[in-house]
Each structure stands twice: as C-alpha cells, then as structure tokens.
C-alpha cells in the first residue's frame, strides 16, 4: 500500500498545481498600487470572447502629470503582437485603446490580432509626462532573458481569455486527474480484494 499512497500523494500535488492561480501577474485591480497617478485599469467586455476585439482603458487621478499614454498587448510569456501604440485620450483623466486598431504585420498586410481561447493576455502601459519622461506600468520586472513565466508575468497587467466551449467541454486537468485517481483506487481494491 506504500507505493499506492505515494502515487496518490503525487497525484494530489499535481491536482493542486493544476488549479493554482497564475504565478504572479498583476491584475487590473492592482493598477493603482503600481503607480500613484493611476485610479484604475481595465478592459471591456469583462469576458472577451475568442476571435473578437476588445478595448482597454486607463483612468488617472485628477491632476495627474501624464500628458500621453501608449499601450502594448502581449501573450504573456510568449510574445508581444506589435510595438507600443498610442492610446486615445478620452478626457483629462482617461486613455483608451481598441484592439481593432492594434494590428500585426503579416503576409497579407496589417491585420487585427486573432485572440484565441485560453490565452493569457497582458497589457503594458507607457505613461509620458509633460517633460517627456516615460514610465512603464507596470515597471519592468527585470527578467532579462529568463523564461520564468512568474517573472515575465510581472511585466503586465494580465487577464485570461476563456477556454474554448465547443459542444461538450473537454475535461480539465483536474477532472482528468480525479478520474485517474479513481482508476488507481479501483485497481488497488481489485488486487487487495
């Protein structure tokens, strides 16, 4: 029974890792803690359907010294889709962008990004004051050339695209592990009668 106990313990640890939240990304709610000039950051719609475009918004506190803002959208830990692009100033405290206008170069020319199910997306803002000084939001995490996703995530304010939902949903990692635990337990009972 010792080997079976070890297998079950290992599977339980894997199940815990499967449902653990992303390592250390900044959420949109964290934006005010990243820069004292920021009131909020977000995107709309709240749940972005795969293969659709969305908007991002940055709201600043009244009296902020930010004269202009740019943004960059990336697939966290993979690549950014295009260089930073200017955000549109809506009013004295609000900047907005629409991903329909954020294009990538391809063999057929510039086209909007096709955001896919299950992607983790990150937005980095570039805030420029009247003197021309630019601050990154969030600030560069100093990851260098590392492939440590936890470090890379700290370079963005991130959110997740929902998983695909065609027909019957595919089993999640956790449910697959639970089925495997049941199979192991059933076979152990048969062997030990």
Image (cartoon, rainbow, N blue to C red):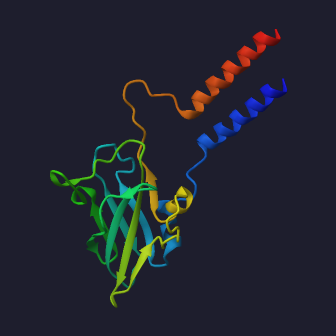
Quadrant location of the N terminus? top right
In the displayed structure, 8 sits above or below 130; it is above
The one of 185 and 34 positioned closer to us in this rendering: 185
At horizontal 78% and vertical 25% (from top left) the residue drawn is 4
Quadrant location of the C terminus? top right
Left or right side of 47 for 52: left
In the displayed structure, 65 sits above or below 97; it is below
Left or right side of 42 for 33: right
The one of 24 and 52 positioned closer to us in this rendering: 24
The one of 101 and 44 positioned closer to us in this rendering: 101
Q: Position of residue 33 (x, y in %)?
A: 53, 71
At horizontal 50% and vertical 69% (from top left) the residue drawn is 144
Determine the residue located farthest toward the right in the rendered image. 2
Quarter of image, res 158: bottom left
At horizontal 56% and vertical 58% (from top left) the residue drawn is 150
Determine the residue located farthest toward the bottom in the rendered image. 131
Q: Position of residue 110 (x, y in %)?
A: 18, 56
Q: Position of residue 14 (x, y in %)?
A: 65, 38
Q: Position of residue 49 (x, y in %)?
A: 34, 43
Query: Can residue 26 be seen in the rendering of this structure?
Result: no
At horizontal 34% and vertical 91% (from top left) the residue drawn is 131
In the displayed structure, 161 sits above or below 186; it is below
Query: Can residue 153 be seen in the rendering of this structure?
Result: yes
Determine the residue located farthest toward the front in the rendered image. 145
Left or right side of 16 for 74: left
Give the mark count.
0
């Amino acid at each position: 029974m010792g080997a079976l106990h070890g297998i079950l313990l290992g599977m339980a640890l894997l199940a815990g890792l499967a449902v653990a939240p992303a390592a250390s990304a900044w959420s949109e709610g964290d934006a005010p803690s990243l820069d004292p000039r920021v009131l909020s950051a977000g995107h709309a719609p709240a749940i972005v359907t795969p293969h659709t475009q969305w908007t991002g918004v940055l709201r600043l506190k009244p009296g902020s010294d930010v004269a202009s803002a740019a943004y960059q959208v990336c697939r966290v830990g993979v690549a950014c889709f295009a260089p930073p692009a200017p955000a549109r100033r809506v009013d004295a405290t609000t900047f907005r962008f629409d991903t329909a206008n954020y294009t990538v170069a391809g063999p057929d020319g510039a086209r909007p990004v096709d955001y896919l199910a299950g992607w983790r997306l990150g937005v980095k803002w570039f805030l420029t004051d009247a003197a021309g000084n630019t601050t990154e939001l969030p600030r560069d995490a100093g990851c260098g050339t590392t492939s440590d996703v936890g470090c890379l995530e700290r370079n963005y304010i991130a959110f997740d695209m929902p998983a695909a939902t065609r027909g019957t949903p595919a089993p999640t990692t956790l449910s697959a592990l639970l089925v495997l635990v049941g199979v192991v337990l059933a076979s152990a009972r048969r062997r030990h009668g």
